[in-house]
Image (cartoon, rainbow, N blue to C red):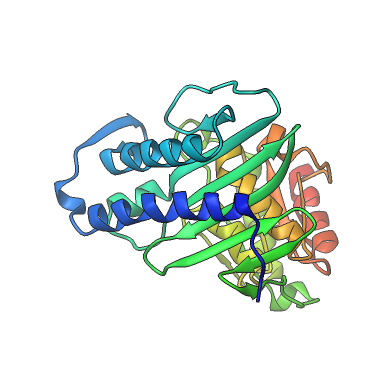
Amino acid sequence: MAVRSAVINVMAAAARKAGRGLIRDFGEVENLQVSLKGPSDFVSTADLKAERILRQELEKARPGYGFLMEESAPVAGDGKHRWIVDPLDGTLNFLHGIPHFCISVALERDGEIVAGVIYEPLRDDEYWAEKGGGAFVSDRRLRVSGRRHLAEAVIATGIPFGAKRDNPIYPKMLNAVAAETAGIRRFGSAALDLAFVAAGKFDGYWEFSLNAWDIAAGILLVREAGGYVTDFEGGHDVMRSGNVFAANDHLHLPLGRLLRQANKA
């Protein structure tokens, strides 16, 4: 049985409490008050409520830690520890009644992600990892897939939207990957895409211009499950660039080569 640290218990408890509110609101999605932030970019009362609950619970358990959250201004805190939180990843899915969304919470210590929880409320799936301790879903150990050939692989992606939709590189990458793999999936939640790579459901994943709260917990999950996460050029500072490319240990090199060749075409 997996042994959870105190900090994972704190993160999981906060995510579960916020998740209960999301489940209730998802059942009444047509009645939600929704404000438009920009094209294809929405914020709901459910999103804001979940964020308030997460902040309250995390602050109560670890006073003095900083915060980086999607809907609120950053909080500096002690300068050593920082919670990185997405209270509702997959907001557009949620608002359209599509049951694919999650809560993502990561703990950064001295600039390094050391713990992460991705909670999928509707399925009650709790993905979690600590640096050096492996990755798990509930109490089951996770491992990236063992597929070795691109022709057998299913790859996830996120399609650029809003102000980012005119990215000229993405269509080239999409065409290149589609031609060489068994299939591409676009589910609309970066955090869950990374969790699914860690769980071996997807063999790889790539996306442009993400925020830290989208990917912080998922990066740790993939790495602790034996996978690789870099940017498209092989760099490891993915949190800074926001360009993420994850895959199992067999496919990271050939898939990365495919993406880079498409970028240069």
The tally of labels here is 0
Q: Can residue 223 be seen in this view?
A: yes
Q: Is residue 211 visible?
A: no
Which picture quadrant has residue 179?
bottom right
- Is 122 or 260 nearer to us in this picture? 122
Task: State left or right for residue 260 relative to residue 87.
Answer: right
Tell me if residue 48 comes above or below residue 228 in the rendering: above
Which picture quadrant has residue 19?
bottom left
Query: What residue is drawn where x is 26% and y is 38%?
Result: 45
The location of residue 192, given as percent across then percent down, is 53, 58
Tell me if residue 15 comes above or below residue 80 in the rendering: below
The location of residue 190, given as percent across then percent down, is 55, 51
- Is 130 or 175 nearer to us in this picture? 130
The location of residue 117, given as percent across then percent down, is 57, 54
- Is 77 or 197 nearer to us in this picture? 77
Query: What residue is drawn where x is 85% and y is 60%?
Result: 253
Residue pushed farthest left?
31
Which picture quadrant has residue 146?
bottom right
The location of residue 243, given as percent across then percent down, is 68, 41
Quarter of the image that includes the N terminus: bottom right
Tell me if residue 204 comes above or below residue 245 in the rendering: below
Query: What residue is drawn where x is 33% and y is 36%?
Result: 48
- Is 73 or 56 nearer to us in this picture? 56
